[in-house]
Image: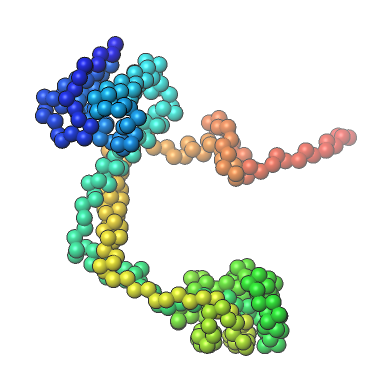
């Protein structure tokens, strides 16, 4: 049974209602009620342009919102309960997801108190390398064994100074296989020769040669690199970066709030795990086969031997039967 009140003194964006008015029952659906406070809370979440779709006047909007949204929600929810949909595993998964999201949202809200100036400054000082960077140049390189080979490559590039030609040469001829697959792209290189590639640091001579040309220019002569020679192309420059504490303070406060929330979630999980987890038998998941493509195989019966084949491997080829003599 649904019963709706004839009128409520509710405004679309009213201030806090007196307790008696807020508790007034606007509609009753079975054993559930919708109060004026609930209507106000839900209406406050709707953008004004969407509220206009419920009517032309505030009274019409309020009435239609209650009947078309709130009452409808309760009717469908009670219909789902009557059909015992909450016992379905997929519905239980969704309920757990909503509860999990609500808990995380509350933790994040509690942890969102702004960090103090001292905390912000301490983070900035401990992570200065994240807020500053030296000037850098993007370099492409082909590394070969002899000066003659490097000069021949430079002659080819003068005829066809295109990025694609350089990449093709690097893939085919560069002795540095770690970068040849990228067409010789070393990325941005710092003045001391350090790169983002682990273990790759350019010799000072290469950086000095790159400093003598402009962005987009090839170094006109082969550059010695140990007992080998490099063909260098200076692609572009990046100016030094230096962000002040005042510039980074807003983002640092967000980082600290996120870290505080993560710490609270971890602490809560550890407490709940010790309190509620029991009978944990992770070895039973060995009954589930997952192929190399991520597909699930049917569960093996307890006690059966594991397959000697790798997950997702094709079945063994049949062996021709030999006659027994």
Q: Nearer the viewer, residue 127 or 158?
A: 158
Relative horizontal placement of residue 105, taking residue 146 as reference (left or right):
left
Q: Is residue 200 above or below residue 40?
A: below
**Residue 312 in picture, x, y percent from top left:** 63, 42
Residue drawn at point x = 45 percent, y = 75 percent: 238
Q: Residue at x 34, y 34 (%)?
A: 50
Q: Is residue 54 above or below residue 191?
A: above
Given residues 67 and 102, the one toward you in this image is 67
Toward the top, the furthest residue is 1
Camera-nearest residue between 264 and 105: 105
Locate the C terminus by quadrant.
top right
Q: Is residue 180 visible?
A: no
Q: How is the image coloured?
A: rainbow
Q: Is residue 121 above or below residue 225?
A: above
Q: Residue at x 19, y 65 (%)?
A: 118
Q: Quadrant of residue 3?
A: top left
Where residue 182 appears, as percent x and y from the top left, is 60, 68
Residue 111 visible to an observer of this rendering: yes
Residue nearer the viewer, 165 or 95: 165
Q: Is residue 99 left or right of residue 294?
A: left
In the figure, is residue 86 to the left or right of 162?
Answer: left
Which image quadrant: the N terminus?
top left
Q: Hey, which residue is sitting farthest front in the picture?
A: 56
Q: Position of residue 292 (x, y in %)?
A: 60, 45
Number of numbered discs overlaid on the protein picture: 0
Q: Position of residue 321 (x, y in %)?
A: 83, 36
């Amino acid at each position: 049974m649904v019963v709706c009140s004839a009128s409520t003194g509710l405004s679309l964006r009213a201030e806090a209602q007196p307790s008696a008015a807020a508790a007034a029952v606007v509609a009753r659906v079975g054993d559930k009620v919708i109060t004026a406070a609930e209507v106000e809370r839900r209406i406050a979440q709707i953008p004004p342009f969407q509220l206009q779709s419920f009517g032309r006047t505030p009274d019409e909007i309020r009435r239609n919102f209650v009947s078309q949204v709130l009452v409808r929600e309760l009717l469908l929810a009670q219909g789902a309960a009557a059909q015992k949909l909450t016992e379905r595993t997929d519905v239980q998964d969704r309920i757990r997801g909503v509860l999990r999201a609500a808990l995380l949202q509350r933790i994040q809200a509690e942890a969102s108190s702004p960090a103090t100036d001292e905390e912000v400054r301490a983070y900035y000082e401990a992570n200065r390398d994240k807020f500053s960077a030296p000037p850098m140049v993007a370099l492409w390189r082909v590394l070969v064994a002899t000066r003659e080979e490097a000069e021949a490559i430079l002659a080819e590039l003068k005829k066809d100074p295109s990025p694609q030609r350089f990449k093709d040469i690097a893939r085919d001829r560069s002795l540095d296989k770690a970068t040849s697959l990228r067409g010789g792209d070393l990325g941005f290189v710092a003045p001391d020769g350090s790169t983002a590639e682990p273990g790759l640091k350019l010799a000072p001579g290469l950086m000095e040669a790159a400093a003598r040309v402009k962005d987009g220019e090839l170094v006109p002569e082969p550059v010695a690199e140990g007992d080998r020679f490099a063909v260098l192309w200076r692609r572009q420059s990046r100016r030094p970066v230096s962000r002040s504490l005042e510039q980074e303070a807003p983002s640092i406060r967000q980082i600290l709030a996120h870290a505080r929330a993560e710490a609270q979630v971890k602490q809560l999980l550890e407490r709940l795990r010790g309190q509620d987890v029991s009978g944990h038998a992770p070895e039973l998941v060995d009954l589930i086969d997952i192929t190399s493509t991520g597909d699930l195989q049917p569960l093996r019966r307890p006690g059966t031997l594991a397959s000697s084949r790798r997950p997702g491997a094709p079945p063994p080829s049949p062996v021709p039967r030999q006659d027994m003599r």
